[in-house]
Image (cartoon, rainbow, N blue to C red):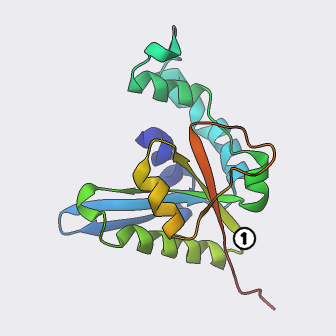
Amino acid sequence: MGLIYAAPYATLAPQDCLVAEDDDGLVGSVVGTRDTRTFERLLEAAWWPALRARYPEPQGDPNAWDVDQRRHAMMHHPTSAPDPVVADYPAHMHVNLLGRAQRRGLGRLLVQRWLDHAAGHRVTGVHVAANRANAGALAFWPRLGFKALGDLAGVPSSRHIWMGRKIAFEPQP
């Protein structure tokens, strides 16, 4: 999971990563990119090749794959964000919190700081992809102003629910 949803951001876009810690260490992060399409190209050029060499593409029935095999398949066949989503919400982010940091407002704080950071770089919108089976995420994102984007033409049905939020920034003179 970390090789897909955390490490590439810390390595290739550290300027867009925030972390939180407590007395016991790291408890959470928000990672993302201000430009999804550029980041996807960077992943293809500089991140996925080494992982593909290290983790072979799984064979056989995908329904019989274990969790690791499904992640390996993702490395070989990454999902691009749908064009209609990126058109209006060009940035994207991921939030991860350890259990001891959840339900304390830290996720909200991290997301708001990331949105402020993105606004400072003139980003107009951000999207997330929440797994349909993740009830916590499906409740979390709307509370932070993200709306489901399922009504966009051209967005295929998948295991994700795409959500987006516009970002207001002060135009520079």
**In percent of the image, x 62 and y 56: which residue is there?**
163
Task: Say whether residue 40 is left or right of residue 19.
Answer: right
Task: Say whether residue 164 is left or right of residue 5.
Answer: right
Percent x, y of residue 76? 59, 25
> What is the quadrant of residue 118 in the picture?
bottom right
Residue 17 in sight? no
Secondary structure found at label 1: loop
**In percent of the image, x 57 and y 70: which residue is there?**
145
From the viewer's side, name the closer residue of 5 and 44.
Answer: 5
Q: Which residue is mark 1?
A: 124
**In percent of the image, x 43 and y 71: which residue is there?**
108
Which residue of the protein is positioned furthest toward the front in this rendering?
A: 151
From the viewer's side, name the closer residue of 158 and 65.
Answer: 158
> What is the quadrant of residue 50 in the picture?
top right
Task: Say whether residue 98 is left or right of residue 59.
Answer: left
Percent x, y of residue 111? 49, 69
Which residue of the protein is positioned furthest toward the top in this rendering?
A: 60
Task: Say whether residue 38 is left or right of residue 2.
Answer: right
Q: Is disc 1 surrounded by few (<14), some (14 to 19) or many (20+) residues within 10 Å?
A: some
Residue 66 in sight? yes
Answer above or below: position of 48 versus 6: above
- Mark 1: amino acid: Thr
From the viewer's side, name the closer residue of 172 and 150.
Answer: 150
**In percent of the image, x 67 and y 37: which residue is there?**
157
